Image (tube, helix red, strand yellow):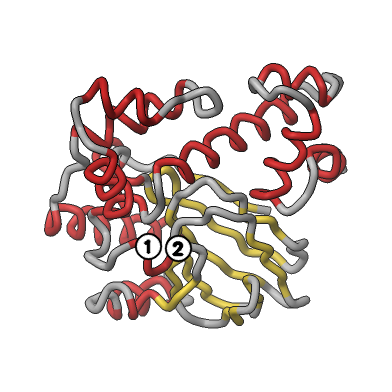
């Protein structure tokens, strides 16, 4: 139902992927919490993301630290979207990302000069290929305009977290880098809109989801141990805290 497109090389530091959908039957979607930023263009169709009604507009979906449900009405859904990396998010808007954490807001409230982009994406006589090309060009110009690199400090900490999100000791990393925790947390807050601990939790649960998908016959107890939990009940609680469902329920959902 969704078609995912890889960004051109010049956008790969900023964009995870482009995607589009044009279909009648979209089942409810769970937007998993991975901390990434999304831009959504609703060309046609109505839907609801948590308590926000979506229609023929463009939206900015802030960093998600919890699972968000997206429900669709029974009509043609014509959607175009792009997912941004942390560097892309930092160079897309000057708005502090913590202000839109776990929120979906209209794009015009985040970026003032996007009206021509929205109009172009909404044109019905333009192919999806041309829409994505125009969106790519617009984003490239936007990123060049702001040109705010991710600090070496933040890049180092995020890489360390991604390597071992469960067992990582942030205080130890800060000591190794000779920085205080306030400076590190400020860097995270400004660039990602969340704390380092929240980011570590999201990476931990993302790793859990990956194992659940790739190892459907592996017991939940074994998976909990792989992820360095002391017991399965602790794993269940942490997973449900982020995902809203247990690992068992998630496994059942992806199997259908």
Image location of residue 135, percent across then percent down: 33, 60
Pick the residue in front: 116 or 206. 206
Residue 101's disc number: 2
Above or below: residue 111 compared with residue 96: below
Above or below: residue 116 compared with residue 196: below
Q: Quadrant of the C terminus?
A: top right
Image location of residue 59, percent across then percent down: 45, 72
Q: Residues within 10 Å of mark 1 (few under 14, many from 20)?
A: some
Above or below: residue 222 compared with residue 251: above
SS category of the residue bearing label 1: helix
Q: Residue at x 68, y 17 (%)?
A: 226
Pick the residue in front: 69 or 72. 69
Image location of residue 157, percent across then percent down: 32, 31
Q: Residue at x 85, y 44 (%)?
A: 249
Q: Are marks 2 and 1 in contact (CB under 8 Å)?
A: yes
Q: Quadrant location of residue 222?
A: top right
């Amino acid at each position: 139902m969704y078609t995912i497109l890889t960004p051109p090389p010049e956008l790969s530091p900023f964009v995870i992927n482009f995607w589009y959908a044009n279909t009648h039957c979209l089942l409810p979607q769970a937007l998993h919490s991975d901390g990434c930023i999304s831009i959504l263009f609703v060309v046609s169709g109505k839907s609801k993301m948590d308590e926000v009604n979506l229609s023929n507009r463009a939206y900015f979906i802030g960093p998600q630290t919890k699972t968000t449900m997206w429900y669709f009405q029974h009509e043609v859904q014509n959607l175009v979207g792009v997912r941004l990396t942390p560097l892309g998010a930092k160079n897309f808007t000057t708005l502090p990302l913590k202000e839109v954490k776990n929120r979906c807001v209209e794009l015009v409230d985040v970026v003032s000069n996007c009206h021509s982009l929205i109009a172009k994406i909404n044109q019905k006589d333009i192919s999806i290929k041309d829409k994505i090309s125009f969106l790519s060009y617009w984003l490239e110009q936007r990123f060049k305009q702001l040109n705010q690199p991710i600090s070496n400090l933040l890049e180092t900490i995020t890489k360390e977290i991604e390597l071992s999100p469960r067992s990582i000791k942030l205080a130890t990393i800060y000591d190794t880098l000779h920085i205080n925790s306030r400076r590190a947390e400020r860097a995270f807050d400004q660039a990602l809109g969340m704390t380092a601990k929240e980011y570590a939790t999201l990476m931990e649960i993302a790793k859990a989801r990956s194992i659940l998908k790739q190892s459907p016959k592996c017991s939940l107890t074994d998976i909990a141990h792989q992820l360095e939990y002391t017991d399965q009940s602790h794993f269940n609680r942490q997973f449900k805290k982020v995902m809203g469902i247990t690992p068992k329920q998630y496994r059942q959902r992806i199997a259908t």
